[in-house]
Image (cartoon, coloured by chain):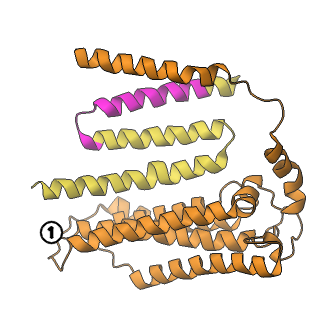
Chain colours: A orange, B yellow
Amino acid sequence: MVRYIIVFLLLIGFGAMLYPLVAEFQSPDQLPEVASVYAHEGPQEIGAANLVTAVVVTYRGLDTLGEVTILFLSATIVAFMLKLAQKNRPSRTIRPVSEILQTASKVLTPAIFLLGVYVFIHGHLTPGGGFQGGAILASGFVLMLLAKPDLRWNKTLIHAVESISGFAFVFIGILGMVYAGGFLDNSLLALGTFGTLLSAGVIPLIYLFIGLKVGAELASIVGNLQESQNQIV
Amino acid sequence: MLIKLLALVVGLLILGIALFALHARKVSVAILGAGAVSLLASVMFLLMAAPDVAMTEAAIGSGLSTIIFFYILNKIRQQNG
C-alpha cells in the first residue's frame, strides 16, 4: 500500500516537473527557419517528391549513415553472442508446421518481398524508404522461417549482400564529395523529371543499397536466433 | 473532427492494452499486448499524417521486435529447465 502511494506521488511530481513544457507550448503558425528552407527549396534542389526522403537521405545523409552503422553493430553483436553459446550441439526435433501456414507462406512470401522492394525503390516518391522496405523484406524472411523452422539459409550470400551494399552506400557518398557538392550529395546523377521513378539524382540508388543492407541485417538477426533455438541447450 | 475522435479512441485503446500487458499473468500474453500497442501506435502516426514513421513502427515495432521477444522468451525458458 505504501509502495503504491510512493509511486503515485512520484508520478504526480514527474507530471508537475513536465507541466511547464506543456503549458508554454503553442503551435507555431509558420515553419521554423530550417524547415521552411527544406520545404520551399527542397523540391527544386533535391527533386524528390517525398520531402521526408530528401531530408533523410540528402540533407541529413550523415545521420542515416550513423543509423545504418548502429544497426550493423547490433546485428554483429547478436551473431557474436549467439556464436559463443553454441558449439556443435545436437539439434532438437521440430514439431511439424501446420499445412495452412506452409501453403500461405508459399503464396505470401513472394508478394511480401515484392512489396519491400517496391517500398525502397519508390522511397523518393511515396512514403517509405530503405529502412521500411528492408524491414518488410526481413518480415518476409520471418514468415519463411515460421513455415520451415529448419530452413538452411545462405549466410555467405546474406553477409555478401550486406557488406557490398554498405560499401556502395559510403562509396556513393565519397563520389559525391569528389564530383558534386559534398558527402552524399544527390546531384551526382541528373535530377530528372520531378515525380518519375528515375529522378532525384542518386536517392533511388542509395535507398536501394540501404534497403538491401537493412533487410540483410534484420534477416541475419532473426535467422541466427532461430538457428540457436533449434539447438538443444 | 472525425480524425480527432478516431485518435482519441486509438489513444484510449493504447492505454488500455498497455495496462492489460502490464498486468497479464503470462509473459507471452504481455508480449502480444506490447505488439498490439505498437500496431495501434502506427495507426496513430498515420492519423497524425506521418506515414513514413507509421510504416517503420508497423514493420519493426509490432512485427520484428515481437518475434525477437518470443525467441528470447523461449531461450530463457530452455535455460531455466
Q: Is residue A202 left or right of residue B35?
A: right
* Residue A190 sits inside the magenta stretch: no
**Does the magenta segment cover residue B8?**
yes
**Residue placed at 50% from the left, 18% from the top?**
A16
Where in the figure is residue A204, as x and y percent of width and height? 72, 70
Q: Quadrant of residue A219?
A: bottom left
Dot 1 surroundings within 10 Å: few (below 14), some, or many (20 or more)?
A: some
Compared to residue A37, the image places residue A56 above or below, namely below
Residues drawn in magenta: B7-28
Query: Principal SS element in the magenta part?
Result: helix
Q: Percent from the top left, x then y, of residue A191?
A: 86, 70
Could you tell me which quadrant the N terminus of chain B lies in? top right
Q: Residue furthest left?
A: B81
Which amino acid does the dot numbered 1 rest on? Answer: Ile
In terms of depth relative to the viewer, which is nearer, A32 or B39?
Answer: A32
Q: x, y (%) of residue A162?
A: 51, 77
Whole-percent x, y for residue A48 in the image: 80, 61
Residue drawn at x 82%, y 51% is A38
- Asked if A195 appears above or below B39 in the picture, the reply is below
Q: Please indicate, yes or no, whether residue A13 appears anywhere in the rendered image.
A: yes
Q: Residue at x 45, y 48 (%)?
A: B62
Position of residue A165 relative to residue A211, above or below, is below
Q: Residue at x 69, y 54 (%)?
A: A127
| Residue A10 lies in quadrant | top left
Could you say whether the residue bearing mark 1 is in a helix, strand or loop? loop
Q: Would you name the residue on which mark 1 appears?
A: A232
